[in-house]
Each structure stands twice: as structure tokens, then as C-alpha cells.
Image (tube, rainbow, N blue to C red):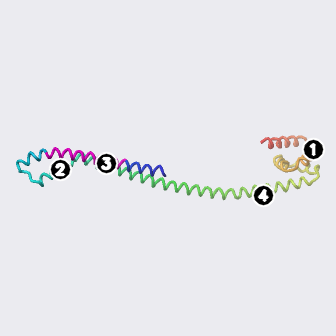
Amino acid sequence: MKGRAWGRIWIRILVLAVTAKLVVLVGMMLNFQSDFGLEEDQASAASKQVSTTETKKTRSEKACHPELLSLLRTRMAELDEREAKLQKKEQDLLVLQKDIQDKIKQLKELQQKLEGPVKKKRFEEEARLQHLAGVYSSMDPVRAAALLDKLDEGTVTKLFAIMKSKKVAKILANMSPEKAARISQQLYGKEAE
């Protein structure tokens, strides 16, 4: 936002600078024409045919160069139009910024709503896994091995990751060698990560 504000300030400074230069230029031209006009007026004043009101009128007409005034008006109109466009863009950007902030807020709220149940489910799953690990840890290793042999290897690996090493070793010793080897490999892989 600061960049846009500075942009508007610079545009206004440029408008003022251009306007000041044009005023100086017009002043110089008026001065030049006044000097030139005075010489002509002095020559014609000798004839006493031109009244003072007509002299003032011709000076002001000489001072008003239609081309210069037209150029000034065109440039001012362009600058006004440019400033209006910049203000419009700034307003549009403010609206877009507000929309984006609203969307971000909505997404954060949605994320919190979605994370709540996921965290709850993970917590419940972890609690069930802890409970099951406790059950198998308290069992006789031969009986636990027979039951764990029938479970899928992923679940057994998760249970063994929670249980104490001595208990896991006793249960693995009573499991089928092939399954014990695969589970050991998965446990090793989990520890390597």
C-alpha cells in the first residue's frame, strides 16, 4: 500500500512541476509579448487612435495562445485521467486484498475444523494401540506370538515399536521365522527413518 501512496504523491509532484514550468513559460511569453506589445503601443499611441480598453484587450488576446492553452488543458486532462485510473486500481486492489484476507481466514477455520477430528482419531488410534501393546506385553510370549502371527505385519510392527525390547524379543522368538524376519526388517526400517 505504501508503494501506491508514494506513486500518487509522485504523480501529484509531477503534475505540480509540469504546471509550474508551464506557468513560468506562460509568464515569460507574456513578459516578452508585453515588451513587444509596449513598443508597438508606443508607436501607435502617437497616433492616439487606440483606446486604453482596446489596448488591454489586445494584450490579453496576445497573452492567450490557444495552442498553449489547449496543450495545457490536454495535459491536465491526461494527468487527471491517469490519477483517476490509479485511484480506481488502488480501490480494486484494496477490495481484492480484503477478499484474499477473508479467504485465508476461512481456510484457516476450515483447516482447524478438519484437523480437530483427524487429531482426535489419531489420539484414539494411538490409545487403542497402547492398550493393545499393554495386553500383548502382559501375555505369555508363546501365547502372544501365536496371536500376533495371525495379525497383519503392519499392525504387529506398530505394536512392537511401542513395546519394550525384552518382551518383543521373547515374542519374536516364538513366532514363525519368516514372519519374525519380515517384522524385524520393518522395525529396522522404521528405526532407520
* Numbered-mark total: 4
Between discs 2 and 3, the one toward the N terminus: 3
Instruction: Please say if 137 is above or below 184.
Output: below
- The numbered disc on residue 61 is 2
Q: State the residue position of label 3.
A: 20
Q: Position of residue 44 (x, y in %)?
A: 8, 47
Q: State the residue position of label 4.
A: 124
Q: Nearer the viewer, mark 2 or mark 3?
A: 3
Between discs 2 and 1, the one toward the N terminus: 2
The prevailing secondary structure element of the residues shown in magenta is: helix
| Amino acid found under the numbered disc labelled 1 | Ala
The foreground one among 89 and 13 is 13
Rendered residue at 29%/46% (across/down): 22
Quarter of the image that includes the C terminus: top right
Rendered residue at 16%/44% (across/down): 36
The range drawn in magenta is 14-38
Q: Nearer the viewer, mark 2 or mark 4?
A: 2
Q: CA distance from mark 2 to mark 4?
A: 93 Å
